[in-house]
Image (cartoon, rainbow, N blue to C red):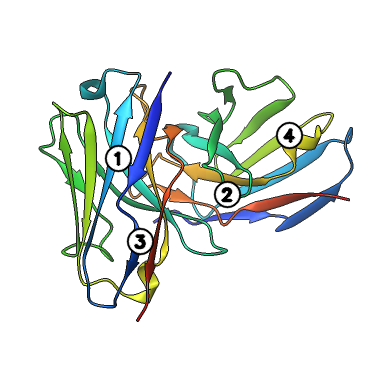
């Protein structure tokens, strides 16, 4: 069955960096775009980034450009999110999700999430 | 960007009743590319509906989606205890993809 397992979250000081990883299994990883979605405490969902199958094209909202970098390893079937210059506003649960390979950017499988807390 | 407004913010119903949740877009959603997700506390969201009205794999037929343009509805018939959760809509017809702020369905 499809599994997505995030790791790498934790407590980081303001201005610090963190790298999240998402290990996947149960599907042909190279056939799917992958995404990171986050959810701040008590808030809704926010699209953070996504990456194409080859790892050659990425997307970030303007608010995160230059601070977050998504990458993927098509040998290890994993996707990473590097985060820099973190602030309290980045505190959230970060979900790794698979983007459907049908037309459209909806998310058909999600991981359980990794908590990132930015605090001194 | 397309702003999605969900209503009501909280819906209080009893098991066995019907729930109707709304998602309104600030502009027409291209090709009705709208999805609904369910999230129980501490869990990952689960895809329920895509393309406004197509149920995802293994989603029971108590769940149905409808609507077009700017107004979309998620209906849950015969509420079961496990249906009490938060629900989010997402549009993916325009970039950036955006989510609504959610509706919390709680037991009355």
How packed mark 2 is, by other alpha carbons closer than 10 Å (few <14, some 14-19, many 20 or more), is few
| Gap in angstroms between the C-alphas marked 3 and 4 | 38 Å
Say whether mark 2 and mark 1 are on the same chain: no
| Gap in angstroms between the C-alphas marked 1 and 2 | 18 Å
Which residue has dot 1 on it?
A22
Element under disc 2: loop
Which residue has dot 4 on it?
B75
Tell me, for residue A10, which label it has, or none.
3
**From the viewer's perspective, is the residue at label 3 or at label 2 nearer?**
3
In terms of depth relative to the viewer, which is nearer, B89 or B44? B44
**From the viewer's perspective, is the residue at label 3 or at label 4 nearer?**
3
**From the viewer's perspective, is the residue at label 4 or at label 1 nearer?**
1
Chain identifier of the residue bearing label 1 in the image: A
Q: Which residue is drawn at 39% across and 49% down?
A: A37
Tell me, for residue B42, which label it has, or none.
2
Say whether mark 4 and mark 3 are on the same chain: no
How packed mark 4 is, by other alpha carbons closer than 10 Å (few <14, some 14-19, many 20 or more), is some
Residue A51, x across and y down, in percent: 22, 40
């Amino acid at each position: 069955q499809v599994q997505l397992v995030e790791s790498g979250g934790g407590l980081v000081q303001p201005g610090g960096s963190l790298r999240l990883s998402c290990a996947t299994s149960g599907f042909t990883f190279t056939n799917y775009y992958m995404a990171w979605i986050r959810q701040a405490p008590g808030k809704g969902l926010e699209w953070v980034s996504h990456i194409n199958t080859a790892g050659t094209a990425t997307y970030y909202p303007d608010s995160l450009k230059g601070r977050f970098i998504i990458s993927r390893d098509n040998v290890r079937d994993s996707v990473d999110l590097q985060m820099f210059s973190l602030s309290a506003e980045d505190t959230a649960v970060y979900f790794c999700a698979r983007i459907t390979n049908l037309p459209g950017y909806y998310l058909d499988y999600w991981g359980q999430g990794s908590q990132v807390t930015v605090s001194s | 960007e397309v702003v999605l407004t969900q209503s009501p913010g909280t819906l209080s119903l009893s098991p066995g009743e019907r729930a109707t949740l709304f998602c309104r877009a600030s502009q027409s959603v291209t090709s009705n590319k709208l999805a609904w997700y369910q999230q129980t506390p501490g869990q990952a969201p689960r895809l329920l509906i895509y393309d406004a009205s197509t149920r995802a794999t293994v989603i029971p037929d108590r769940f149905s989606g409808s609507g077009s343009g700017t107004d979309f509805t998620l209906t849950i018939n015969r509420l079961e205890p496990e249906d009490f959760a938060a629900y989010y809509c997402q549009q993916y017809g325009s970039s950036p993809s955006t989510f609504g702020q959610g509706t919390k369905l709680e037991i009355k």
